[in-house]
Image (tube, helix red, strand yellow):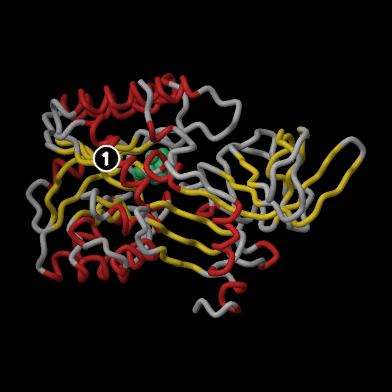
Amino acid sequence: MKYNFLRHDRHDDAVTYQMINELENICSIPLYIYRGDDACRNAVEIQGYLGEDVRLCYAVKANCYLAESLADVIEDFEVSSRGELEYCLGNGVPAEKISYSGVWKTDLEVKMALDAGVKRFIPDSLKQLQMIQNLAEKKGETVDVWLRLSSGNQFGMNIREIAQIFAKKQTDFNINMAGIHYYAGTQRQFVYQVEKDFQPLAEGLAYLKERGISFSKIRLGGGMGVPLYQNDSVRTYEETADYLFGFVRKLSEHYRITYECGRAIASNAGRYITKVFEKKQRENREILLVQGGSHHLKYHGNIVGQKTPFIECVAREERQGEQTYMVCGSLCSAGDILAMKFLHSCVEIGDYMIFYHVGAYSLQEAAILFLKMEMPDILVYNGNNSERKLLELGWISREKGNI
Ligand SMILES: Cc1ncc(COP(=O)(O)O)c(C=O)c1O
């Protein structure tokens, strides 16, 4: 099946040199543009394939800046830290839509969530479950709980622990044992990876059934991948998505499913825009140096630009001739290579470059503090001439008087 959320060029409107140049009057370059309308379209598309019985959840860790736009179309937001919790509550995501998970929790954070009105929790351990229960009891609240089943990594609990908790806690106050939670990993490109991922889930469900333990709900994520590089085969991602949607629909015949998804919703809703400030020649190499760099941009699995992401150069004027460039950022690090081989018509200093598919886990996972360089500006736009919201600002914008 062909999926729009897998396309790197989801936007309908082409970006011109003039458009970026005008943007430079209000914000700084490098700049992240997140399109809330594209994220919403991805969510609606994915919901369509999951079917109406499955609840779609946005994993906020993929990109919290899209949460506000998504709040109109998504009923469930998986939040994994105090920072994400505060950001969502302060930016248009109501507490009733939040499911609180994550590896690390303090009493204070759980209390904050309860006080705000969060009613869904995903404990990572027995200790966390007890903390949630104690605090819910003090508050006189009952909350829904999904126990995280480990896929074999450091997260969650093993199936024996889960069986014991179910057997004991079914009758406890303040905790409604809704079901289990399962997530194995991200950026899955092949069906065999997802089949392997779900093996512990299938075994876990069988184990609980044999012991007469029943529950009605499962939350799970499939780690749906998206093609990030020019040589990626879209076909394998399509097959993986076909498999995942089929798997979830089938499971929803027996359980009430919440499907957690981050990358597939956010990825093509983000673009990073930067500018060429220098050109150099080294032996046979043509090098382009751009503002910003790998401290702002992370592509899953790309080591020193060995793979070429979807990049476009927006030139000041049309030029003849083609050239292969090495594209480097502005860090004092020989590893700050964004692409080893980028083939494009002639690029000059002052041209802009757009990096695609960076709406998920790109800025979020980058080494932002290196050299204490400037943060990129972050602009969120919902299309149709809606207001453009500058959310985070680097110092150039502050000097321009934007805040
Ligand atoms: C528990 C959980 N759910 C959902 C997700 C989202 O996964 P993806 O972005 O691969 O869809 C993650 C990502 O790490 C996660 O840890």
The residue located at (55%, 40%) in the rendering is 300
Residue at 17% across, 29% down: 252
- Crowding at label 1, few (<14), some or many (≥20) Cα neighbours within 10 Å? some
Label 1 within 8 A of ligand 1 by Cβ? no
Residue 342: % across, % down = 71, 36
76 relative to 337 in the view: left or right: left
Tell me which residue sits at (46%, 21%) in the image: 236
User: Residue 101 in the image: x percent, y percent?
Assistant: 31, 53
Q: Amino acid at mark 1?
A: Val
Q: Name the residue beneath numbered marker 1.
A: 44
- The one of 343 and 163 positioned closer to us in this rendering: 343
Residue 155 visible in the snapshot: no
- Residue 346: horizontal and vertical position, in percent? 76, 40
Give residue 74's position: percent from left, percent from top.
24, 49
Query: At x 58% / y 37%, what residue is drawn?
Result: 310
Q: Is residue 397 above or below residue 281?
A: below
Counting labels gives 1
| Residue with the most extreme right position | 283
Query: Circle 1 sits in a helix, a strand or a loop, which is it?
Result: helix
Quadrant of the image containing the N terminus: top left
User: For residue 173, what is the image quadrant?
Assistant: bottom left
User: Residue 127's image quarter?
Assistant: bottom left
Q: Name the quarter showing ligand 1.
A: top left
* Relative side of 252 to 241, left or right: left
207 with respect to 239 (left or right): left
Q: Nearer the viewer, residue 349 or 103?
A: 349
